[in-house]
Structures are given as structure tokens and as C-alpha cells.
Image (tube, rainbow, N blue to C red):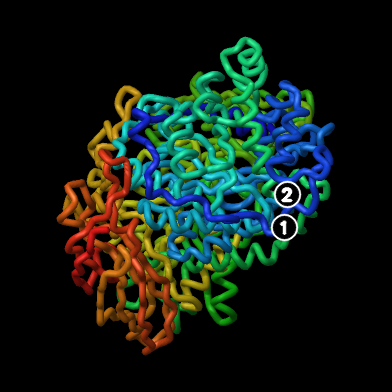
Amino acid sequence: MSEAVSRRSAMRLLATAGTAGTALAASACAPGVPPGAGAPRTPPTAPASTAAGAKGPARIDALLERLTLDEKTALLHGAPDPTFLGQAGYVPGVPRLGIPPLRLTDGPAGVRVARPATALPAPVLLASAFDPALAREYGRVIGREGRALGQDVVLSPMVNLIRTPYAGRNFETLAEDPRLTADLVGEMIRGIQDEGLIATVKHFALNNQEHGRDTVDVIAAEQTLHETELRGFEAAVAAGAGAVMGAYNKVNGVHACESKPLLDELLRNGWGFDGWVMSDWDATHSTVAAIGAGLDMEMPDGTHFGAPLREAVRGGSVPESAVDLAVRRILATMDRFGLLAARPAARPPRDSAAGARTARKVATAGAVLLRNEHGTLPLTGASARSIAVIGPTGQVPFVGGGGSAHVTPDGVDDPLTAIRRRAGNGSTVRYALGEDVYGRPLPAKLLTPAADLEARSVEPGRVFSHEAEFRLAADDEWTLLVHYTGKRPVVRLDGKELFPVRQGVAEYFAGGLLGSAPDGMSVRRTTLALKAGTHRLAVTAEGGDKGQRFRLRHTTGATRAADLAEAVKTAKAARSVVLFAYEDATEGRDRTSLALPGGQERLIEAVAAANPRTTVVLNTSSSTTMPWLPRTGAVLQMYYPGQEGAGATADLLFGDVDPGGRLTQTFPADERATPVGGEPLRYPGVGGRQEYSEGIHVGHRWYDAQRVTPLFPFGHGLSYTTWQYEKLTVRPQRSGLRVEFTVRNTGRRKGTEVAQVYVGPSTELELDQPVRALAGYRRLVLAPGRAERVTLDIDARALSSWDPEQHAWVLGSGRRQVFVGRSSRELPLRSKAVLASR
């Protein structure tokens, strides 16, 4: 199945829109778009052939005069690509007027097309570096590769906040904190657009979960919207984003792509956005309401903006001027990026080596050392010469999450190989699987009549079918897996279909690890309790036009026990253990638990009991509960580390680099103790309605307000050296604060630190305020014994709250407390300053 079909079928959801128009009205304080911000480095070199001599607005005017209504509406929706490159969408141009087509690609962690591209670490890992300059470099890799691979628009970055740890796409976005999110998304967009690729910030707005995302009605107050979710989108507009993608969900009763308060009053009139708004795939629900609210482009087809839009114009329910306005926005953005020039800039070649260097840099910079007891890490001396590597993702590289973020890299190493290479000659590195995620072959003699279902080939046009029985002597839990290359085989056990076709995105987005085997075959699995006795198995596989290969596999209680025993044996024989644990997240599906899936908790407990020098490397999408934590020596959070993740992990384990990442999301001690825990109206919603009743207290702000102790706080991350903070001074300046302090490396190693500044509430504002809000940060690299005097200017926005009566930001004047330290809960320096009202 083509990627275009996959994505269209995979994304059938939408909605979001506002309260009363005034509730989302523009703020007088909202920044405009800086001149030239985010513009491509290579500007148009010549006017379009259709408007000789005309430039800018005059060129667009000339084109609009010559476009027919059919041609105009063809620019407002997607269509099949006659030269498909594996991208997400295509908008045909108008050849007779020199308007080229647009190709739109997925790309939150690299460019997703049919050809290989740099598979970057997940955005959440990038964000953990707390480094806006690195975010810009990350964006430039996407921008250059998108252009090199024939694309014009990238559907990235995702800026929705991490509101619930269950959300399936948390790895695709950045943080739970609005300030950090805003800083990073702005630089990512500048990086993408520096290279001439149009960036699309998504999903506008409040698309913070996958559960019911196409139908849920998200209710959020005006102050909540502006102080949390909207901050990142506002920053994207200020950075010059060329496009905005409307979300699936509703906002305050109205679909997002039909929300005039969101699209017209806020985005355009409030923030000055001058690009175009496209729908998420199959997220347009109307013609008249959508274009009237400010939606410019329907993707991936013309269900509403094709023939129905032309009929609406001819019938008078939509003025042609509304169509012209949407076309103008698209053409003006294309013109800004040089796409309407008579001689458009040549596409650059891919620089895969540079992409790989950035991928490795990001993976090491964002890795978070959560725990390190008794000098477990770094691996040195005897601990580096005798190592047991355990876990499936120790041998099979876990590059990225599933769904539209999946990228096919040029090549990828596995951690076991990287660790062996780094350990060098004279070291012993043993491996044990620990948990089998792809299954063992079914013994041929298990079945009556016997059949080998491990390596079956079905010729084109042929059908393979086999029915058999097998007998179990005792009750057991089995996982049955089918691996296949064509149409999924039908497998029935005792008359029940084990792998039915799923609805929507769940059918196509099966995860970045578990959805395919190491040899590329697609995989589906199901776990069930089988009773002792006889069971009947039936398998039917079709060859189709091209033929296919398939295999049927299984795991049982006995195989799991054997894997666990082998892991314990291997751990006992080694000086150190590196145990890789995973959680496979994907678009289209939320997590059902914050615990590690399968038997991994039992595996960690057993291995750590056998060898206390056990380091757990987490390849997970978001926060994880850790009942096994006290038994471990160290825990290293690597998220989804991209194509260079194996080498980066080895760099960190052996201390070649200091782990400089810090958590951009709070890890709860108990999944009932989260901002949405035990509150079904907050998540996942009740009766299709969801309320953001936590208000402005998103993420770490909620833990502070409720005085809940997390497992690991926002901003947490350990180093291989030690740090001291001293000499804090705070003084007012120009409606803000200047904060100065000294950070000293008091250890014996070069290290990386992320110094963080938080501000307390204003006593003069009668508005809900956080106990502490992140106001600034600085990433530092210091040699042993060295110190740096850090100066951070806290601007008025960081000291302001949104007043829903004034529909504006208001400065929180008066006495303000300032906190400085290593995380939201480790703040050794405190001071106060009086902020004068403006």
C-alpha cells in the first residue's frame, strides 16, 4: 500500500474551535512577525513567467486575474501525485501560468518519503538538551533534506504540549512547559526555513491526545489557552512559519478547522500570521463554514474544497473573494520561498554525513541520566571490560516511533555492536535476549497434520491454506505473531480471527519497533490465555499480484521463562549489565499504562537482583513508572534516539560525553498522581467532551500546586560531575528582571549543566498563577574546577499573565520571588525583587 493511501486512510479525524470571539481575541501584546524571519536563504531570483516584470503582491494579483475558478479551487486541496515520491500530500499547480505543484512531507524527526533520509532523534529528545541553537541545527537538517528529496512543505514541527503522559505522540512533540516549547519551536522553524523548505506548525490547537482525537470537544478557558497551549503557536508565527495545520478535535464546541476565533481573530488578526492554514488529513468537515473561518487548504483531497466549493461559489453561498483570499495566501507564501520564480533555486544534494553528525549530536546532548548510584556509570576499568547486554532493543536498534514520524534511514547500527566496538579488544560483551518480541517458530510437529509455517512463500495469484490441531497439556499464555510481506494472512484460532483489519490509523501505524521485523516484514501480534486441551488453527494467505512471504510464530510461558533464566545467567557472569527496555508508541493510539509493556518489569527486577550494577537504558516515548527503580544502579533515558542512537548510547555509557539532557516532562511516581490522573473528564474525556480544568497548571506547575512529589521532576538530569550554584543577584530592568548567578563545576570531569530560573507569582495580580514558572535557562559546558557567571534577562512575557477580561497580557508587578537551580524541585538559590508596573 502506498504511503499516500496509508496516510489518507490512517488519519480520519478533526475538529477544534473557540468560545466567543472575544475569548480568543488578539492581545495587544502579541508580537508581530519580524521582517524576514524564517525566510529562505535563497530568495526569488526572477519574476514568474506568468506575470513578467511583476513582483510580490503585484505578481500574485496578476496570477489571480488569470486563474479560472476551477484552477483556483484546485490549489486549495490535495490530489493524487502523478509522480509519487512517497510523501504525505500533493497539490497540483497550474502549468499554463507557471505555478508549480506542492509536495508535502511528514517530518517531525526527519523527512518521510520513499527514499532514505536522516532519521533524527525524536523531538522530545532534542528538547531535553534545552538548547535553542541545537533546535535550529535540527531544523536545518530537515529543511535541506526535504528540499533535496523533492519536497516543498514539511508537516513539522509539532508543538502541542505534553499534557498527559498517555498521549501516543508525546515523542513527536517537545515539552510540558509552554516557555521551553515556544523557544525551541521558533528555532526549529527558522532552521527548516533557512534551507528554503516551508514549515507547517501543528496541530492548531489542543490536539494533546490520540484517543478520540477526531471527535473530542476540548473545553479550555481563555487564560488557560493563552498561557499554555497557544504559546508555542504564537512563537511559531513570530518565527515566520509558512503554514499552520488545523487540528482534528473541537475547541470549545467548534471544529478547529472551522473556528473563526482561532483562525481569523487570533491567528491572523491577533498574531499577524500571513501564511496559509491547511487541514490535517481528512480533518475538514464542511465547505462554507471552513473557508469562511479561514481554512485555506483541505488535505488530502477535495471532498469539501473541490466540486462542493465551486458549486458554493456559483450558488452564492461562498463569495469568490473568499476563494481568492485563500489562493492569495498560498501563492504569497510560495512566492516568499522562491517557488514562483522563473528560475527557482536548484535543489541541494543530500548531505547524509552532515545529517548523521547532527543526529549523533542531538542524541548525546538530549540523553537524560535519571539515576546513578555507587558509580555505576560511566563504565570504566573492570566494569567496562565485562559487560552483559540484555533486552531486544540491545540487538535490534529502536530508531523512532511509529506513524507519520517514522523515517527510513540510510543505515543504522545496533547498541550491542556499538558497545562491543567501544569496549574494545580484551573485553567480554555477552548478550541475552531477555524478552522475545518477534516470536519463535511453531514446531512443525506441534500441528496435526504437520506444517512448516516459518518460511512460507505464496506465488502470485495463488492461495495457501492449512488447517491443523494442536494440544496443550496445561493452561498457558501464548502470544501469536504473523510476519508477512503482502496482504495480511488470515489466522483463526478456534474459529476466531486473530489479526483482523483495524479501523483508521491503527491499521497502518503499528509502532516503530513492534510493527516490523528486523528483516522488514510487517508484524502483527496478539496475546491470549489458552486452556489445556485441543485447539484448531487455520491459516490462509494470498499471493496477490506480486506473491508474498509469511511466517507464523509464537511465545509461551516456557519460552518466556527460558529467556528470563538466560538473562539472569548472563547478568551474573558479567561485571556490569546494560539492560535495554522499550515502550513502542505511535500516532493513532494512546498508551494504556505508564508501566513498561510485556514482561520487562519482571526482567529488570530479576536481572538487577542478580547484578546490582545494572544500568537500564530506556527507549520509551514519554514518562514511565518504575517500581523496579531501587534495585538498579543507573537509569539512562534515551527516548527514541534516531539512526545514530547506538553510537550515542555507547558514548554516554562509557563517559565519552557527559549526559547533558534534562527532563522536559515530569515523571510521576504513580500514574494516579498526574495532572489528569483519576479525572476522566480531563482525560480521556466523558461523552466526547474533555475539560482542561487544571487550567494554567500544566505539567510541573500542577505538581507544585498540588504538592505532589514526582518520581523525577521537570528539569531533572544527573551529570558525571558535580555542580555548585552561588552568588545570586536579581534586579529590575525595563519591565523585566536581570538575574545573575555563578555555576561552578566542582567535580573532576568536564561536564554539561542546564541552569534553570523560575519565578513565583505576583501578589498584585488577582489571576490564577503558577507556584513557579520557568522563566529562563542556560546550557553550560565547563571544565573541572571552572565557573561561569550567568546572566539571564527575564522578559515581560515571562512575568505576565493573561487577563480574560482585558483579553491581553498584564504584567505581574510587585514583589516577585526568583529561584535558580538544577530542576523545578532542586533550587538552592532564591531571591526577591520588586517589579514596577508599566
Image coords of residue 827 (percent x, y):
24, 69
653 versus 166 height, above or below:
below
Q: Is residue 363 left or right of residue 577?
A: right
Q: What residue sits 46% from the left and 46% below the top?
A: 233
Residue at 38%, 34% in the rendered image:
474
Instruction: Let me know if residue 382 appears in the view.
Output: no
Query: How far across and down, in percent of the image, does residue 802 sit?
Result: 29, 46
Mark nearer the N terminus (2 vs 1): 1
Residue 196 % position (x, y)? 68, 53
- Marker disc for residue 42: 1
The quadrant of the picture occupied by the N terminus is top right
Answer left or right for 648 relative to 695. Answer: right
Rendered position, 698 above or below 781: above
Give me the residue at 32% from left, 79% from top: 723
Q: Is residue 240 left or right of residue 732?
A: right
Tally of numbered discs: 2
Which residue is outermost to the bottom?
A: 785
Q: Residues within 10 Å of mark 1 (few under 14, many from 20)?
A: some
Q: Amino acid at mark 1?
A: Thr
**Is the Cβ of the residue at disc 2 closer than 8 Å to that at disc 1?**
yes
From the image, which quarter does the C terminus lie in? Answer: bottom left
Residue hosting label 2: 338
| Residue furthest top as drawn | 315
Above-or-below relation of 581 to 318: below
Residue visible at 38% across and 77% down? 720
Amino acid bearing label 2:
Gly
SS label for mark 1: loop
Instruction: Residue 607: name its quadrant.
Output: bottom left
Residue 816 vertical placement versus 7 (above, below): below
Query: Which numbered disc covers residue 628?
Result: none
